[in-house]
Image (cartoon, helix red, strand yellow):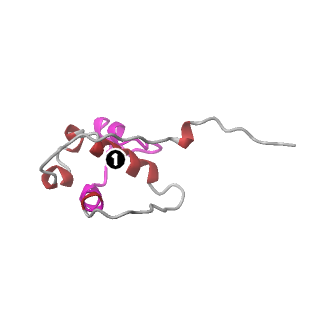
Amino acid sequence: MKYPIGIQDFESIINGNYVYVDKTALIYRLVTEGKIYFLSRPRRFGKSLLVSTLEAYFKGRKELFKGLAIDELEKEWAEFTSSSSNWMAQPTKLCSK
């Protein structure tokens, strides 16, 4: 078993055959219930992976979800415009007087 230590990209985890805890049924519920959500979680608690998974879902990347719960739940795969920002990839500058 390969564990995705430090990997926060859904596509890399799936294509790299890493262990993935399937929470896509919860993602399907989150998307289809049609409410507004504020996703607040502590540091190192999977926010980036969740956003990456949502991005793949909204881009209609059905092949990435083969064998996962959402593959059975979603009947009408469609591609939606999506954007995300990765603040970890931005260089950090320290401000000083």
Q: Is residue 50 left or right of residue 43?
A: left
Q: Is residue 91 left or right of residue 23?
A: right
Residue 23 pos. (x, y %): 29, 57
Query: Which residue is drawn at the image coordinates 32% and 47% (left, top)?
Result: 19
Front residue (pair 30, 80): 80
Q: Is residue 63 left or right of residue 96?
A: left
- Which element is circle 1 on? helix
Say above or below: 25 vs 59. Answer: below
| Quarter location, residue 26 | bottom left
Say above or below: 77 vs 22. Answer: above
Count of numbered labels shown in the rendering: 1
Give the residue at mark 1.
53
Query: Which residue is drawn at the image coordinates 87% and 43% (left, top)?
Result: 97
Q: Amino acid at mark 1?
A: Thr
Query: Which residue is drawn at the image coordinates 31% and 54% (left, top)?
Result: 21
Query: Which residue is drawn at the image coordinates 45% and 45% (left, top)?
Result: 5
Residue 67 pos. (x, y %): 17, 47
Quarter of the image with the N terminus in it: top left
Q: Is residue 28 left or right of residue 55?
A: left
Residue 39 pos. (x, y %): 44, 61
Q: Does the stretch in magenta take in 8?
A: yes
| Magenta segment | 1-30
Q: Does the stretch in magenta take in 93?
A: no
| Quarter location, residue 36 | bottom left
Residue 83 pos. (x, y %): 41, 40
Q: Residue furthest right?
A: 97
